[in-house]
């Protein structure tokens, strides 16, 4: 049984177009005994955004002045809009209030930009994982996603195991970071890109063809970021259809080219990203990755855990 928690909703990106899913999530979480704050963020709207820039920025900066911190800060959905806020976030205030506190900031997709900016500017470890509408509001809540969410937020050390098609063998230790690949690449050359040496980069995306994924990885390589990493873990790459024109050019082809061209291990097939089933990963935590004969093991520690 999950301990009842206080969740504060934030909507720094797109308008929640699936209001039914969001309300289903609210009902589901409340039925489990959780208390939800700032529910007005769900219905807030300005153009395609979940409120104007000031309102959405207040969701983030307001965390710095809360008298009582929630257990979890949960993004309503992704979309687009976080990038507009990065230069106005109160990094000093958020660092002062949140660093080393047992509070979990969780979301993915467009929220990756804010998560990596917080990591770069403050050292805050946040969680790349489920969001309100798309995950907790799904018609059928994934038991896999829910179990991994609470495990990551409450366990000081988390171990993941999965079967990978990767031919790589080895063991690596480093800082876990990454998230949505398009958002990672959008931060190249900005102060919001974390400077990670010897890291383990985890990537996922949606609505991106393999050639676009390869192009983004080449950008990471040519900007000097990829050569500083020890390994890549690939999550889910969904909502993409290949055609006859591709002639066999698929994601597996992209992963193999990364291995051949850049001599970097690519460990594939982690359930992470925009699929219904997703693990929750702490961005900025310490991680150990190992793979032998297609059996991948991933452990992480040093992340905030709820009391």
Image (cartoon, helix red, strand yellow):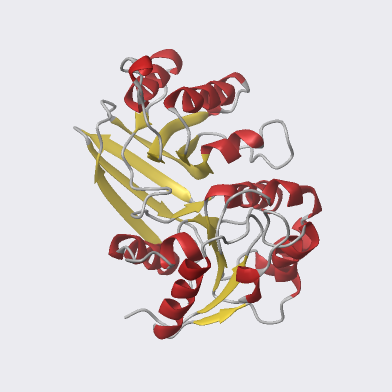
Residue at the image point whose x is 48% and y is 69% from the top: 20
Residue 211 is left or right of residue 191, and the answer is: left
Q: Nearer the viewer, residue 209 or 45?
A: 45
Residue at the image point whose x is 55% and y is 79% from the top: 36
Question: Does any portion of residue 156 appear in the rendered image?
Answer: no
Rendered position, 220 above or below 174? above
Residue at the image point whose x is 71% and y is 81% from the top: 67
Question: Picture coordinates of residue 242 (x, y %)?
Answer: 36, 26
Question: Does any portion of residue 75 appear in the rendered image?
Answer: yes
Question: Picture coordinates of residue 192 (x, y %)?
Answer: 70, 42
Where is the N terminus found, in terms of image quarters? bottom left
Q: Residue furthest left?
A: 293
Quadrant hosting residue 243: top left
Rendered position, 85 above or below 293? below
Residue at the image point whose x is 74% and y is 70% from the top: 62
Q: Nearer the viewer, residue 217 or 197?
A: 217
**Count of numbered marks:** 0
Rendered position, 184 above or below 46? above
Question: Picture coordinates of residue 165 (x, y %)?
Answer: 24, 32
Q: Nearer the viewer, residue 45 or 128?
A: 45
Question: Picture coordinates of residue 281 (x, y %)?
Answer: 44, 53
Q: Nearer the viewer, residue 70 or 121?
A: 70
């Amino acid at each position: 049984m999950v301990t009842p928690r206080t969740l504060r909703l934030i909507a720094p990106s797109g308008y929640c177009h699936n209001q039914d899913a969001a309300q289903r999530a609210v009902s589901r979480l409340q039925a489990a005994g959780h208390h939800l704050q700032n529910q007005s963020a769900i219905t807030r709207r300005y153009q395609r955004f979940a409120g104007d820039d000031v309102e959405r920025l207040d969701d983030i900066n307001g965390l710095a002045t809360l008298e009582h911190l929630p257990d979890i800060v949960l993004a309503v959905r992704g979309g687009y809009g976080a990038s507009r806020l990065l230069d106005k976030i109160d990094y000093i205030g958020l660092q002062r209030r949140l660093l080393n506190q047992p509070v979990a900031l969780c979301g993915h997709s467009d929220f990756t930009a804010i998560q990596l900016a917080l990591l770069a500017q403050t050292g805050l470890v946040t969680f790349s994982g489920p969001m309100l509408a798309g995950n907790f509001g799904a018609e059928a809540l994934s038991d896999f996603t829910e179990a991994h969410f609470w495990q990551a937020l409450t366990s000081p050390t988390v171990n993941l195991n999965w079967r990978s098609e990767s031919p790589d063998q080895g063991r690596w230790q480093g800082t876990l970071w990454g998230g949505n690949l398009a958002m990672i690449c959008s931060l190249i050359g900005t102060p919001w890109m974390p400077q990670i040496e010897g890291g383990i980069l985890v990537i996922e995306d949606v609505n991106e063809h393999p050639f676009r994924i390869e192009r983004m990885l080449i950008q990471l390589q040519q900007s000097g970021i990829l050569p500083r990493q020890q390994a890549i873990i690939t999550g889910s790459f969904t909502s993409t259809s290949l055609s006859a024109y591709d002639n066999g050019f698929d994601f597996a082809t992209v992963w193999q080219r990364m291995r051949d061209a850049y001599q970097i291990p690519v460990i594939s097939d982690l359930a992470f990203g925009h699929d219904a089933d997703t693990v929750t990963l702490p961005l900025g935590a310490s991680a150990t990755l190992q793979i032998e004969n297609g059996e991948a093991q991933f452990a992480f520690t040093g992340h905030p855990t709820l009391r």
